[in-house]
Amino acid sequence: MPAPRSENKMGVMPVHKLLISIALPMIISMLVQAMYNIVDSIYVAQIDAESCATTAISISFPIQNLMIAVGAGTGVGINALLSRSLGEGNREEAGRAAVNGVFLAFLSFVGFLLLGLFVVPHFVPLLTDNPQVASYAVEYLQPVCCLSFGIFGQFAFERLLQSTGKTFYSMITQATGAVINIILDPLFIFGGMGIPAMGMRGAAVATVFGQVVAMIMAILFNRYKNKEIPLSFRHFRPNGRTIRKIYAVGIPSIIMGSIATVMTVFLNLILLTFGEALGKAGEAAFGIYFKLQSFIFMPVFGLNNGMVPIIAYNYGAKKPDRILKTIRLSVTYAVSIMLVGLLIFQFLPEVLLAPFNLDAASFAVAVPALRTISWSFMFAGFCIIITSVFQALSHGMLSMFVSVGRQLIVLIPAAYLLSLSGQIHAVWWAFPIAEIASLALCVVFFLRVYKKEIAPLGKH
């Protein structure tokens, strides 16, 4: 039987103050994470002068992104169920969501351990004709996959903190992991202080080390600071009903993230049709774009992480006005951030690319790539917020439909058709085209969700 509900800041604090207080620590931690992504790529770029290491990181993205999709997607499901249960005053269900979520994180690690051992060595050579690039990519991916218990544990325990609004502690764990990674990168890659040079494998080991430290900190914060969630594994047995609820939101989110992996594989194959030299330059440019755009997208994702528990809690508490105000504020902030990003990418692409040690061919491809793809930023902020609203209200399938429509139904066919022009620069226009399609789907689906889910709350 649900316990009596106590007043929680999610349901009573002024929405603007609440959103800022929860989202700001997440935005800061995401920016630190984005900084790590950039610094890691800069160090890796120094390994060789032919951009082989940079290209290896780019083609490693599909599997690494799949890992993030599984961890983050499961975390979204945990977060949505936990916050809604707390909004309803159901601590027992919140506790089940927490322990079953941690169990699912462990299963995810086992899956990627097997992937690293048996799939990576055979999958990577399919993405490049260059044996040095393939060798670098395998060196990097195997440790990242086989030691992925850190990233999955980090995702699970940080989501428990976020679901109760304790994003300050989540910020500390993420930022500490990223800073440790930044410090260890040059030592493990190039050697020093008694540590042997490990090259690409060193970059992977530094990444894993930072993730494990962040996971341990998140566990300790939950143990001593997060008393709202009863977290006990005594006599634990997986609960099928709770797992289904987590994955009702989590699986569409995982699929959404995984679609980016599929999109990247197909786009790299399209780029290879321009020949080995130009195709390799295109892959390097595309990989660097993804690193650079994280500085723009990560703050919006941090805003999302703050928004989702607020919406889910107030949906459980039947407070539609707070839901709508949260959405309006989140869209306003997200669109503003993306417009700043658009201006930076349009006017300063050469400055953004300067640290990456690109050869002349890759640099010539990357400058117009950044300018063209960034036009999609005009629409992306709104779409990111609205798809997360769907997830918070347990309509993860709608988020998945938007992602499938954008990346598979529109982006890849558009990229292929544009590649027939024989101009690699034309391929990048597929991104703005796909984002416009995403915008249309988001508007249609949101009107439907508002009518069926949000508006009726005001009648209770």
Image (spheres, helix red, strand yellow):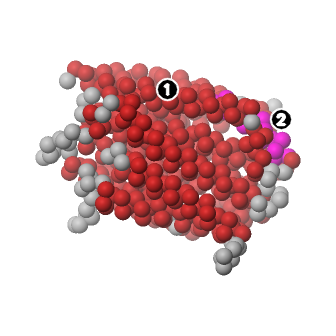
**Residue at disc 1, secondary structure:** helix
Badge number at residue 332: 1
Residue 252 to residue 51: above or below: above
**Residue at disc 2, secondary structure:** loop
Query: Which mark is first along the chain, 2 or 1?
Result: 1
Q: Amino acid at mark 2?
A: Gly
Which percent across, then down, holds residue 276? Answer: 83, 51
Residue at horizontal 85 percent and vertical 46 percent from the top: 361
| Image quadrant containing the C terminus | top left
| Rendering quarter of residue 390 | top left
Residue 241 to residue 416: above or below: below
Which percent across, then down, holds residue 306? Answer: 41, 40
Magenta segment main secondary structure: helix
Residue found at the very far bottom of the displayed protein = 194
Q: Which residue has dot 2 on it?
A: 422
In-front residue for pair 302/119? 302
| Rendering quarter of residue 223 | bottom left
Residue at horizontal 77 percent and vertical 60 percent from the top: 46
Q: Which residues are magenta?
A: 361-376
Residue at horizontal 36 percent and vertical 40 percent from the top: 309
Badge number at residue 125: none
Which percent across, then down, holds residue 38? Answer: 66, 51
Q: Amino acid at mark 1?
A: Thr
Query: Tag 1: Cα neighbours inside 10 Å, few (<14), some, or many (≥20)?
Result: few
Residue at horizontal 36 percent and vertical 63 percent from the top: 220
Residue 238 magenta-highlighted: no
